[in-house]
Image (cartoon, coloured by chain):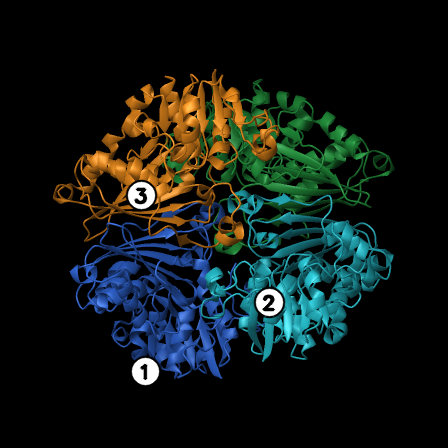
Chain colours: A orange, B blue, C cyan, D green
Amino acid sequence: MIKAGIVGATGYTGSELLRMLAMHPEVSIHAVTSRSDAGKPVSSMFANLRGFVDIPFCSPDPESLVDCDVIFFATPHGVAQAMMPSMLATTAKLIDLSADFRIKDQHVWEEWYQQAHASPELIDQAVYGLPEVNRDAIKKARLIACPGCYPTAIQLGFIPLLEQGLIATRGLIADAKSGVSGAGRKASVSSLMAECADSFKAYAVSGHRHRPEIEQGLTQAAGEPVNLNFVPHLVPMIRGIEATLYAPLNAKGLNKTMEALQAVFEERYADEPFVDVMPLGSLPETRSVKGSNICRLALHKQANSDMLIVLSVIDNLVKGASGQAIQAMNLMFDLDEACGLSHVPLSP
Amino acid sequence: MIKAGIVGATGYTGSELLRMLAMHPEVSIHAVTSRSDAGKPVSSMFANLRGFVDIPFCSPDPESLVDCDVIFFATPHGVAQAMMPSMLATTAKLIDLSADFRIKDQHVWEEWYQQAHASPELIDQAVYGLPEVNRDAIKKARLIACPGCYPTAIQLGFIPLLEQGLIATRGLIADAKSGVSGAGRKASVSSLMAECADSFKAYAVSGHRHRPEIEQGLTQAAGEPVNLNFVPHLVPMIRGIEATLYAPLNAKGLNKTMEALQAVFEERYADEPFVDVMPLGSLPETRSVKGSNICRLALHKQANSDMLIVLSVIDNLVKGASGQAIQAMNLMFDLDEACGLSHVPLSP
Amino acid sequence: MIKAGIVGATGYTGSELLRMLAMHPEVSIHAVTSRSDAGKPVSSMFANLRGFVDIPFCSPDPESLVDCDVIFFATPHGVAQAMMPSMLATTAKLIDLSADFRIKDQHVWEEWYQQAHASPELIDQAVYGLPEVNRDAIKKARLIACPGCYPTAIQLGFIPLLEQGLIATRGLIADAKSGVSGAGRKASVSSLMAECADSFKAYAVSGHRHRPEIEQGLTQAAGEPVNLNFVPHLVPMIRGIEATLYAPLNAKGLNKTMEALQAVFEERYADEPFVDVMPLGSLPETRSVKGSNICRLALHKQANSDMLIVLSVIDNLVKGASGQAIQAMNLMFDLDEACGLSHVPLSP
Amino acid sequence: MIKAGIVGATGYTGSELLRMLAMHPEVSIHAVTSRSDAGKPVSSMFANLRGFVDIPFCSPDPESLVDCDVIFFATPHGVAQAMMPSMLATTAKLIDLSADFRIKDQHVWEEWYQQAHASPELIDQAVYGLPEVNRDAIKKARLIACPGCYPTAIQLGFIPLLEQGLIATRGLIADAKSGVSGAGRKASVSSLMAECADSFKAYAVSGHRHRPEIEQGLTQAAGEPVNLNFVPHLVPMIRGIEATLYAPLNAKGLNKTMEALQAVFEERYADEPFVDVMPLGSLPETRSVKGSNICRLALHKQANSDMLIVLSVIDNLVKGASGQAIQAMNLMFDLDEACGLSHVPLSP
């Protein structure tokens, strides 16, 4: 059994890791850290884990984690990069769910996160943990930077088009919508149910931290700089991201039928265990992936338009965070990539 | 007092009309028709109206309506156009909340609504009831075609830009989101709470009936054909529409600062009682207009982008339907335009 | 115009007071205090008030409030009782929406609220602001203690039975359910949407602060000590309280038919502008009173049972707080009791 | 592998059976019937099943089902009892999730369900499928009548007290609350999201069909007739039942400390894989069992009261329906009782 440690498990990505690892046949949960809750049973904070995770929180000291085979960081940005040097002294594989190592350009990271990077020398070493793009590198990696939730949903929708050179690289639009768990499990007025429920809004319209991460991935797929308008919105639901992507077809793309564009997607993801290219014209709902690691995609085009519309849905806490982290872990430990990740989505 | 009749009041626009008319100081509710519920107290169907609307439904015969000064049609499409000839024999002013007379091109209407138009000779006579565009015509009209909910939110956001020639007329995008009351009050599996709640999806992506109506209005504002991509989405909330509009600035538009673009909006709507141009960079929430006739707008632009982003929110049942109908009625009867419409939005 | 001041308007009862006072024809909002937000426009915090309340927050100094004719306290418990001596130096009428003066027995208050009472000498002077019980006293009062939200819904349901001696005074049960706005507008993990939505739970089952307040009112109605089991629950909705009351009929009560019991309620509330005794067997929904000052009641009895079941619904922020406060204000200023309170509930 | 057939899989208990059986290691889904949808892929109706259940619906003919080892009926009441004689000709074990065989007194059944029973001769043979009560009988049964959702939550909370004679057998109260999936997946105005969301109500207060089923089970536990007041309520959430039970302690019960009463529950359920007796004073939330077969219970008593309060939560579609059916199947086929049922609840 792989001994897993989770640093900072009091948030939603942490508790989701615990939920999924508790059902993983090859993993035992060895250490769950929380400085403020050390000593308290994990299940006293997360009642759904009663009977499944029966250990207490421990403090996030290196000693607590030294025996782990894999350590997950489900911490706010800044924490993993500060702890990382001491963690490298262990033998554990390291999977960071935060934003600390996602952006390859240190200055861009520092500009968007408004702080100096604490471990810039590790940025190069970190592998961006999107298996659909970096599978081989993930297998060999010591340190994984798990993609953000919006970046996962959006990149998977644009990448086949950019790789094949079928769309412009300027004027792309990602109109994305997230459930409230994306804001994290921390006390805040703006995330109160009385503030969020029965309402809808755009936020961070002038600039969201996920934009440079997405553009980095799209640029890599295209082989040239990609420019994206990215507008996130808050949906009064708990889990799920939907991204409606507007991709301006170029001459090569306009030459293709919708069936041919569909084939591009189907071929690109033919061997992917967690990407479902739905039939042309489908309308994916976020609930169709709730609690699962699946991304579902569907293509559309409106009459008298040059814009390909790609719909993409994921569970922000699973394929957008903890499930993707476990998928990377499976690859790193040479397990079946889908091991412990084959839950049927919960619906209704 | 103006005697009002409502035809087809068993849906959400009908019940919302009743709610608002019951508080209107110049109106008495004279007849509320429903063929299937004739004789039953209106308040037995809509408990919120107990103590406010104390008459029974009557059958939708011309006799029931003959004394009315104004007749509202809150019926599915096809009904008002079939009844209209007999209604013209009364002296009542006629306000149709359905889609029957919104589209000026009969063939476009028939194509999208898949039926022959029953009163094509009245299409020209009908005035499109968007006061921000057609105020004077509304005042003199006999027959009003109330704009749809999406068209209201979207046109109000694009019109100032098109009128001033600041954006391209092709490649416009309206990514719009609606609460579930937009689907109406009729038995259907897809609108069940267990199907809609805690989930999010796009729908009618290949083509929605509101698209030609919106393009018609935008084309009129631009003075040349406007082409729009329009993707509606279903939000797990009851009321509200949010539209995120992507407007590709042309050379003239790119020459303007954001402050100048903001000024364009502020001047365009300076005298409008129900359009609130919020400060630059604001993030309008649908709950900020819940139960009210207000449309709130806000402008944004992202770094390194030529796209102006306009955020627009309305209450789909008020400014998107019943409130707008009453605003038109106020104009037609030479009342203060805001009479009976000055409710503070309900929040939280 | 009555000049109104609101102390502590950054919570939900405060913003609801502002919403309703902004529509009140006899009131002008004169001062809205918030120590931490002084200087900021009120509408920058509550976007629904944009265009309706256009003054900034001021600091809660006596000078800010000295010109007011009426001062509302929408503050956490402990604040009003500390400020009250200086407020009594003004000429304003004083309406406290907090729990500070609701409980007549100082020691009971101190036990449940775990602090010493700061103005015990004022407890006797304060009038419990339930118009259905204390109308005449309210008219003459200087200081009103507004009832809590649960106490309003529950007392209105039990009082007719206790006044007529139709039920036992021991073994009463109030199983009550509240929307999340009842928890207030303060940062807290347990009130996050991701924690509350799509779930249901009982809370404070071992003892809730509203229990002694309710028992005090029921005891007064019965003329003898009344003992109540009171279990509050949290409903994933924003506004509304539903209380399902189990009233053990005594011999006198069992002698009455349901029609006779119904008549007891109808007579008790015949002249009440805000209590709606629905027809026997009705099923009141909280949405039927949303945004309004109405309490709706309905009676039931199951086969082979001695228990009368009373269903009671209110909007916790209106009849359970701010609307009730305005109702008291209307009485204190000799206005029509329903002035500014006749909004039709918002539904759907 | 056990070959399973599901009759009537287009509702929520049917789709939940499919979700859980698709993850069951000892079961293959052999036939899924729907008369109206025969030929359509199951996953075209339930998008969450895409990639997990890849067969089409078939018509509900005996031939479709003849090879099955177990047949589940997820049909409206009346259907299973009509089909049952022909089903008995197969060799399959039969598990009925509907109400057809739950009530042992044919006349009581016919009175509450308002129709003649189609297979009265099978009522005696059917075993009430509550493993916590009937484990041995279930193992040997041919035909299982799965308990209803409310009856499961309520019986598990009262049974330990009645078996030990600690409470009165008259005046029991079950104030129960259910998510909207309990109303089923059928077109109906009253279950629309715009009708249910952001609201709360009691329903069927004068008498609900689950009352006689619950009283039958409680009477069996007590060994004497038990009389219950049962009030169901509709919660604006998808899944989950919470029951707040008021149990009037008798002299024997009042003699016990809370710790002793807690011990009664812990002992009663010590070996139960799916009943979690939480620590004294706990507040179970429905989300703590979402998607799982667990029932969580907690005990409370208020000061100066003789009423023991038991809180009980289940997922109405799992322990209240499909999970319980699979638990029975596991017993019938001599599998580990928890086989395929050990999912960690999904939270948040």
Residue identified by numbered label 3 = A211
Q: CA distance from mark 1 to mark 2?
A: 45 Å
2 and 3 marks in contact (CB < 8 Å) = no
Residue type indicated by callout 3: Arg
Per the image, label 2 sits on a secondary structure element best described as strand
Of badges 2 and 3, the one in the foreground is 2
Residue identified by numbered label 2 = C6
Crowding at mark 2 (Cα within 10 Å: few <14, some 14-19, many 20+): many
* Residue B125 placement (x, y as % from top left): 27, 77
Per the image, label 1 sits on a secondary structure element best described as helix
Write the residue at 47% across / 76% down: B340
Residue type indicated by callout 2: Ile
1 and 2 marks in contact (CB < 8 Å) = no
Residue identified by numbered label 1 = B140
Per the image, label 3 sits on a secondary structure element best described as helix
Residue B296 is at least partly visible in this image: yes
- The residue lying toward the viewer, choosing from C305 and A70, is A70
* Residue A283 placement (x, y as % from top left): 34, 44
Crowding at mark 1 (Cα within 10 Å: few <14, some 14-19, many 20+): few
Labels 3 and 1 in the same subunit = no
Lateral position of residue C90 relative to residue B73, left or right: right
Labels 1 and 2 in the same subunit = no
Lateral position of residue C244 relative to residue A3, left or right: right
* Residue A99 placement (x, y as % from top left): 38, 35
3 and 1 marks in contact (CB < 8 Å) = no
Lateral position of residue A336 relative to residue C283, left or right: left
Q: Chain of mark 1?
A: B
Q: CA distance from mark 3 to mark 1?
A: 51 Å
- The residue lying toward the viewer, choosing from C166 and D204, is C166
Of badges 1 and 2, the one in the foreground is 2
